[in-house]
Amino acid sequence: MKKINSALISVFHKDGLDEIVKTLDSLGVTIYSTGGTQNYIESLGVGVEAVEDLTSYPSILDGRVKTLHPKVFGGLLARREASHLAQLQEYDIPEIDLVIVDLYPFEETVANTDDEATIIEKIDIGGISLIRAAAKNYKDVTVVSSKEEYSILLELLKEKQGFTTLDDRRELARQAFKVSSNYDVAIFNYFNEGTADLSFKHSIHRSDILRYGENPHQSGVFYGDFEAMFEKMNGKAVSYNNMVDIDAAVQIMREFRDDDPTFAILKHTNTCGLATRNTLKEAWDAALACDNISAFGGIFVCNRSVDLVTAQSIDKLFYEVVIAPDFDKEALELLSKKKNRILLKINNFDVRKRSFRSLLNGVVEQDTDLKTEGSEDLNLATKKAPSESETEDLLFASVAVKHLKSNGIALVKNKQLIGMGCGQPSRVSALQQAIAKAKDFGFDLDGAVMASDAFFPFPDCVEIAKGVGINAVIQPGGSIKDQLSIDYCNENGMAMVMTGIRHFKH
């Protein structure tokens, strides 16, 4: 056990600091501080030694240099053993037993402004140096590196009357290096933005332990700020599989966030129901009709506030999660009666511009597929052009197929996904699966359109599509045998547009 006799306090966030300062004072701890923190401590009626008096140097360069001095760092880095203590005595350097530092909010500043001068001034130099020095010397020094640890320190001070154990100090040092490494990564990524440097550095401050991983025998943790995206209105803890499906749901509804009322139903990340209508209830009914069997236990997502009439229909099914921009009061009351069902109010449908996943012994990173085809992307490949309504359905289908596992085929009619094939080893198999599903749920394929996530290497898919009444096709093109499919369409009165954009999803 070591007693804290002296403390250096220099923080940005002062909320929660008052009780710590008063407790330190009651324990007879000498407090050193500078600048705004010193003024704050003095306002509490607590005596404080100015760092400037210790170092005999004032804060200079607009506050850029305050604590960077041997009389500060000597007191932090000295091992409490004869040779080091003798040097402290020789140079009149006091031992510093506790450091409380809360760094300048660099990441928050980057998120709130593009002004580089403002951002640069939020790169903490003295604070990060104090944290690293104190953490390095954890055998003798206690370090508190962020406001999140104020409560931990306060509990220690009260429980142990100003004493700390080696285990206490080592744990706080661990957290300090976590803070410092996160901080350095954030600064590097700011400077690295837009450069050709492909270094992969990522840091997430928050983590939540999940009920389990993909299966019960696997543990799982989510690293991220779930509450920044969603307000959880009801339900049990979100699971690993819920997280994966929620991500897929956000990705597809991002495409329709500004469109007419749209509902999507997902199962195992694939969209098994999708429709746009004049009202949300109509969109729900149409999406459910796509595959009311797979909807059982699914993830539901929409781009409008859920009203009571829609909620009454949703409530008839077993589901895992409903995601919406909001819930009307009566709808929320109804859906919340099922305590385990997760209701998420989404703040926005924005997704990261870069995405990554673990593979083998490393990580792959790429641009997120944010491309959504518009009419300007449609290049007519055939003599016959699609009608206006077919063009609307083709664009709808191109979004639907983009969010299916490859190989993927989407069949659409009147802005409703009526058949889908996904995750198949051949595109023909995906089409056959889509046709079978459409027929199983009673859809008439005559006049439907087809979308493929990648090119047709042979004309077999357009031949099969024509056989069930499909007369318009959208695909990226790019096969050396594109002409075979184009020729078949021309010979059989079909319209085909090519986008030049592939949407593989593995």
Image (cartoon, rainbow, N blue to C red):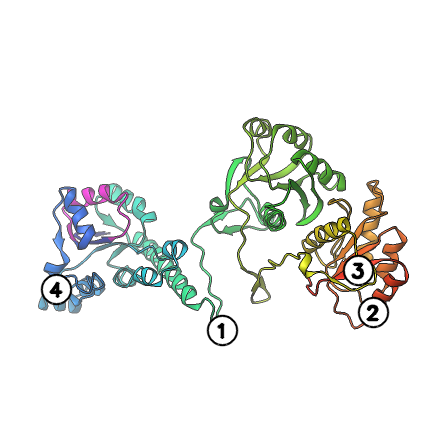
Percent of width and height locating residue 158: 24, 41
Q: Residue under circle 1?
A: 196
Label 3 CA crowd tier, 10 Å (few <14, some 14–19, many 20+): many
Circle 2 — which element?
A: helix
Percent of width and height locating residue 108: 38, 53
CB within 8 Å, label 3 to label 2:
no
Q: Residue under circle 3?
A: 496
Please give the range of residues in magenta: 11-32
Camera-side mark, 2 or 1 = 2
Camera-side mark, 1 or 4 = 1
Please state which of residues 390 and 276 is positioned toward the viewer in this rendering: 390
Q: Residue under circle 2?
A: 483
> Residue 406 falls in which quadrant of the image?
bottom right
Q: Is residue 304 left or right of residue 16?
A: right
Camera-side mark, 3 or 4 = 3
Position of 343 relative to 217 (above/below): above
Circle 3 — which element?
A: strand
**Which badge, 4 or 2, is on the more N-terminal residue?**
4
**Which badge, 1 or 4, is on the more N-terminal residue?**
4
